Amino acid sequence: MTTNSAAISEGWVESVSPRAVTKGSSILGLQNLTKRFGAITALENVSVDINKGEFITVIGPSGCGKSTLFNIVAGLDSPDDGHIAHHSRAIDARELLGQVAFMPQQDLLLPWRTVLDNAILAIELEGTPRAKARAQALKMLPEFGLKGFEKHYPHQLSGGMRQRVALMRTFLFRRELMLLDEPFGALDSLTRSMMQRWLLEIWQHHERTVLFITHDIDEAIFLADRVLVMSARPGRVKLEQRIDLPRPRRGDIVTSEEFMAIKRRLLAEIEEESMKSFAS
Amino acid sequence: MKAWIAPIMRGNSFRLALGVLAMALAWQLSVVLFKVPVHYLPSLPLIAERLSHYPDPFIAGFIRTASEMLIGLAVGTLFGLLSAVIMQRYRMVRHLLLPLFIISQTIPVIAFGAIVVMWFGNSLLAKAVIAFYLTFFTITVNTLAGLDSVDPKQISLLRSFGASNQQLLWRLQLPSALPAFFTGLKLAVATSLSGAVVGEWFGDTTGLGVLLLQSMYNEDTISLWSAILLVALLGSVCFGVVAAIEKRVLFWQHKQDINH
């Protein structure tokens, strides 16, 4: 990524984000990202523009490099090639560390901290005094269905509740971009669809930008403004599907004709990729 | 002895009392039934009589040995924790120091004790140093293992929140290492006590170790057993205190085990 500074001076930034802007200005522009681990190419020429207020879902077969992509966007890993622009300013991947609210697959709650103290972990690390952080979190509890549970410990909660605590931690860490890595993957399907609708409400209320990884095609369509379908290894963005279903979306939208049409189209693409990764 | 210490680990003081009582009963019964001579195993009332008639050397010895042990244990614990944190942070230091630590532990305490007495004389400090020598290593090794076993995903998460190394240490690594640390500490309680007792054998006038040695030379089995029981009492009380603290501090651990 040392080539980045050179890229700025060559006016590379101006050529970025040729795509139509839907909601707001570009928060994060990823251009031709490539990442290799030894002989394996995890990502190849991945380009994505993330605009303010957008809800983007990423779907693809296992091992398509979704997690690698997330680690790069979270600032935890650097690509071998490619450019990253944050608010149209070229930056090094590592500069994104602490700039993005990241929520991994597992809730990763600290077992010795109460619900409230787990929720404030990120803003506490940022330097918010504990008392102030707690007061902030206490106000958010009802919205996350955790009212009255502030003094509980993670081992006293159900899977869905633990996930909501982790989400609350992510929301409290006020960053423009939220990265959610299969947050509902471990939940049963009823809890899952409830959580999806709830997440959309919260998202609209808090006006955040979300990049969301999932294995579930219904979930990908239901939540998104845009669905990115990734290819089997090496991971590439195979298809970018805009989802124009009206919002707010109700649970029964998944049975509508438009939804089905989109799903059929995406399924065909994903199936092809799954077959590829299955065969290899 | 470990079999009846174990119940404390589960925090069941009733069962512990029952175990001690059963053992005392078995002791007393076998002495009476099989008419065991006093110089093999004295009866418990004889020991109680000795302790109540001549309490002074035993009380002084108990306090002395307890002080040696606790000073050694405290310094050893702090040193062990600190060295574990430093070794975890700096690979270079780990590769340099850990082998030296291991070599230090291969030196028999007898050899080491002689040197310490030559350096520090027949002082309380000398015994505390020996207790320390037998303590810090288990703390270092266990804490280091605990620090190493922190989930890398957990570290990545905190890093993504912009955590500094120091925040990572206090908020995540040290709390995560606590279970392993307490395992080390419980072992260290036992070894620090042996260190203090053995240290006294290099020469001193007070202490439970001194009483053990004197009783042996005098073939005074009643005093010998009195001293042994007091050493056991000291060890188990300290162990019980550590186990109780552990249970309080690690409240989240045992409950987690039930859940998973």
Image: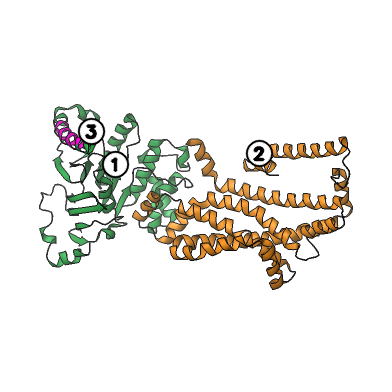
Q: Which residue is mark 2?
A: B12
- Which chain is disc 1 placed on? A
Residue B181: image x %, image y %? 55, 53
Q: Which residue is mark 3?
A: A218
Position above or below: B181 against A252:
below
Residue A276 shown left or right of residue B31 in the figure: left
Residue A71, label in figure:
none
Question: Hey, which quadrant is residue B81 in on the image?
Answer: bottom right
Residue B59 visible in the displayed image: no
Residue A115 shown left or right of residue A272 in the figure: right
Which of the two marks, 3 or 1, is nearer to us in this view? 3
Judging from the image, what secondary structure is the residue with disc 1 in? helix
Magenta stretch in the rendered image: A262-275
Q: Which chain is orange?
A: B
Residue type at mark 1? Ile
Residue B190: image x %, image y %? 66, 52
Main SS of residues in magenta: helix
